Amino acid sequence: MESISPSLIQSMKNFVLKYGPRTWLLLGIYILLCGFILVEDTSIYHRLFYILFIPPTIILLTQRNHFRIVSNPIVFLYLAFILVSFISTLVSTPAALGNMSTRAGYIFALFATASLAFTQSTRYSSYAALMAGFTVLFACLYSFGPWLADLIKAGHFDSRFIGPGNLDNPLLSSHIFGFYTVTFALTATYANKRSLTFASYLAAICFLIMTLSTGSRTPVLALAITGLWLPLINPNSKTIATLLGLCTAFAITYAFIPELLLNRGLSYRPELWSMALEKIKEAPLLGYGFDVEPSLYIAKLGTAFHEPHNMHLSILYFTGFLGFAFWTGMHVAALVACIKNKEKPIFVLASCLLVYGVVAGMTEGGGLLPRPKEHWFITWIPLALIAALSYSQQQRVVKKSSTEDNRRC
């Protein structure tokens, strides 16, 4: 048997060293964005996240220039937010500090891995995200078809679409469908290839239909606000056309199926918010700490809710006004970064995802620092995307400056 030549072994080794880390990072992005569809067991989805995101974070922290990610305003404000959360939890429920620290580490791993991936290649990272989006689309259409057929057969529209895989709640599913509606609408707006433009428009329409089919109204409002934001940050004929297309879709929906938008009132949200604010007044500075859930009793339903169904009020409840200031600061810093780079389509897309997430979180959001799940699509993923884009841009500037200095020498 002929032995393998040393040159071939060296070539294989070089190939693995060159493309292995990049493949790992891209696979992490792909699994994060569509893994909940591919597996039905939440614990498996979480394990995949840990395997794919923790190692790159460790690698980043062992590099000499790892401090640069902390200098990113979004990441710095996140760490300040975690410090406040730590103090609040230490005061109220010190036994929960271990669990809180672990959850905070998962989110930092998201920031770190996304930053490494986009530093390696913004283009391939974007392709991985789009591939994940199309994977979600095909999987959801496979279950949407039978659901729609049953709906038409029944002759009424009181059923709410949920989706396959880990998805088990129509409101939470709407976060993901809305996320991809924005992603593909913006991809279609800025894509240079006709084939990608056409495919992205079709995907955006399908995700918009699925968003409406969940029967959740807040994502509709979030999409409307996002549509208004788009021509503000980047006014041109394409963005205005995207806004008009979205308005047309809503008008057609209201004209033919108004119950999708109007059939369930406010779902006791104002009552929940009012009771949550009363509890916040009792611990305004630092809040109640990690894992101290409120008990908000609705007499008409005879049920106690353990979250205010408002992400921003949840942050205010758990971390007080001090934590909420850093939470707001993260979003403001992210938005400022996008406005500064508004000539770049990917920053425009990121800003739209951020705006969508902020508005979508107005009627949903529970515990502080959740594990990877639907809530991440309207909170941590948009923030991590903007932090990663800013970090990769910073690294390119540093590399270019270093190269110019070497040439001078």
Image (spheres, rainbow, N blue to C red):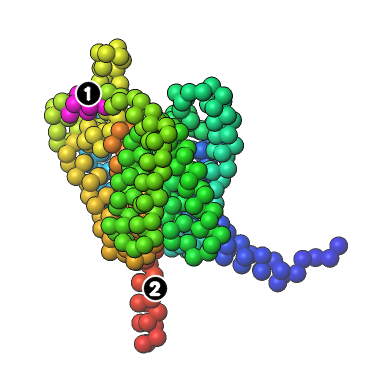
Residue at 26% of width from left, 17% of height from top? 298
The reply to whether discs 2 and 1 touch (Cβ–Cβ < 8 Å) is: no
Q: Which mark is residue 14?
A: none
Kindly indicate the quadrant of the structure image that contains residue 14. bottom right
**Kind of residue at disc 1:** Glu
**284 relative to 226 in the view: left or right:** left
Report whether residue 150 is seen.
yes
Above or below, comparing residue 188 to residue 371 in the picture: below
The foreground one among 268 and 387 is 268
The secondary structure that most of the magenta stretch takes on is helix
Going by the picture, which residue comes out furthest to the front? 255
User: Which circle's residue, 2 or 1, is located before the other in the chain?
Assistant: 1
Q: Which label belongs to residue 271?
A: 1
State the CA–CA distance, disc 2 to disc 1: 54 Å
Q: Which residues are magenta?
A: 269-277
Instruction: Classify 10 Å Cα crowding around label 2: few (below 14), some (14-19), many (20 and above).
Output: few
Residue ID for mark 2:
399
Most distant residue in the bottom direction:
408
Quadrant in the picture for the N terminus: bottom right
Decide which of 70, 345 is in the foreground and name it: 345
Looking at the image, residue 288 sits to the left or right of residue 107; the answer is left
Residue 370 visible here: no
Q: Nearer the viewer, mark 2 or mark 1?
A: 1
- Residue at position x 54%, y 43% from top? 137
Callout 1: 10 Å neighbours few (<14), some, many (20+)? Answer: some
Q: Position of residue 127 (x, y in %)?
A: 52, 57
